[in-house]
Amino acid sequence: MAGRLAGKVAIITGGSRGIGQAMGRAMALEGARVVLASRKLEAVEAAAREVAAGLPEGSVFARACHVGDAEQCRDLVAWASDHVGAVDVLVNNAGTNPFFGPLLQISEEAFDKTFEVNLKSAWRLATDVARRLVTAGRPGAIISVASVLGMRAAPFQGAYGMTKAGLISLTQTLATELGAARIRVNAIAPGLIDTRLAGVIVKSEALTKAFTDRTALKRVGRPEEVAGLAVFLASDESSYITGHTFPVDAGYVAM
C-alpha cells in the first residue's frame, strides 16, 4: 500500500536530531524520499542512517548545509533536485537560540545570528523551492517550524520569539502570493518540546514548570508529537489548507 507521501521529495533542514529527525522518519515511512540537512555532515549522516532503518534503499539522504550561508542554501536545493528529484516539500526546521536573557543584554552578534539562521534561511530556501515549482508548473508544500513564542511574549528569548513571529508572517504572505500556483505554505508552532535546542529550559525544573503550568496537558512534548502534523501538511490530505500556523503546545496558547 502506497504511503501518504509516495512519490514526493522532501527537504528537511535541522534534520540531524530532535524535531527534524522525527519529521524525516515520519515522512520516509509515508513513502517520501527525504533529504535531511544539517550543518555537520557526520551528525546528519548518522541521523539519516537511523531514519532509514528498515526502509528501502534510496529513501533517505544526508546533506551538509549551514543554512546561515546563502550559497550553501542554494547548493542544497540544487543538489536535491539533481540527485534525488524535483522537490515537492520543504520543511524549514533549522533554528538556533544563542542567547537566553533580557533583550536589553543581547549582543548585536547574537541578534544577527538568530535572524540569519531562523528567518533569513527560511526565506532563502522557500523562495528558491517556490521558484522551481512555479517554473515547472508543479504544486508543492512549504512548512516552517515557528514557535508559540512567536505568538506570545517571549521573555528572555526575545530575539528568538521575533524570528518565529517573522516566520508566521512569512508563511501568511507566501501562502497568499503562491496560492494561485498551487503551492501551499503553512507553519507549525511547537510549545516546549524535549530537544537539545530547548535544553536550557527542559533541564531546569523551575523553567519547565513555569511553561507546563500554563498548559492544559501539564507536560513537555516529544519530537514525534510534532512530526505527524508535518506529514499531514505535506500530504494531499491538507490540499485546502494554506496560510495557517498550527500550535502543537499542550494548550499553551489557549490558556
Image: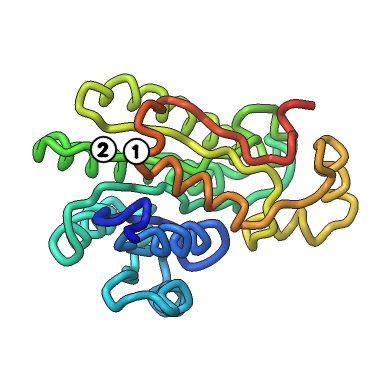
In the depicted view, which residue is nearer to us: 197 or 62? Answer: 62
Q: Quadrant of residue 249?
A: top right
For the residue marked with disc 2, what is the amino acid?
A: Thr
Residue at image point 29% right, 78% down: 57
In the depicted view, which residue is nearer to us: 164 or 132? Answer: 132
Q: Residues within 10 Å of mark 2 (few under 14, many from 20)?
A: some
Residue 12 — which label?
Answer: none
Classify residue 7 as left or right of residue 52. Answer: left
Image coordinates for residue 235, horizontal then vertical, percent = 37, 44
Q: Quadrant of residue 147?
A: top right
Image coordinates for residue 227, horizontal then vertical, percent = 53, 53
Disc 1: which residue: 123
- Asked which secondary structure carries label 2, the reply is helix
For the residue marked with disc 1, what is the amino acid?
A: Trp
Image coordinates for residue 253, horizontal then vertical, percent = 71, 29
Classify residue 250 as left or right of residue 110. Answer: right
Disc 2: which residue: 127
- 41 w.r.t. 157: above or below: below
Cβ–Cβ under 8 Å for marks 1 and 2: yes
Classify residue 162 as left or right of residue 171. Answer: right
Quarter of the rendering occupied by the N terminus? bottom left
Residue at image point 22% right, 60% down: 80
Image coordinates for residue 151, horizontal then vertical, percent = 62, 28
Quarter of the rendering occupied by the C terminus? top right
Tally of numbered tags: 2
- 91 w.r.t. 244: above or below: below
In the depicted view, which residue is nearer to us: 153 or 89? Answer: 89
Residue at image point 76% right, 53% down: 201
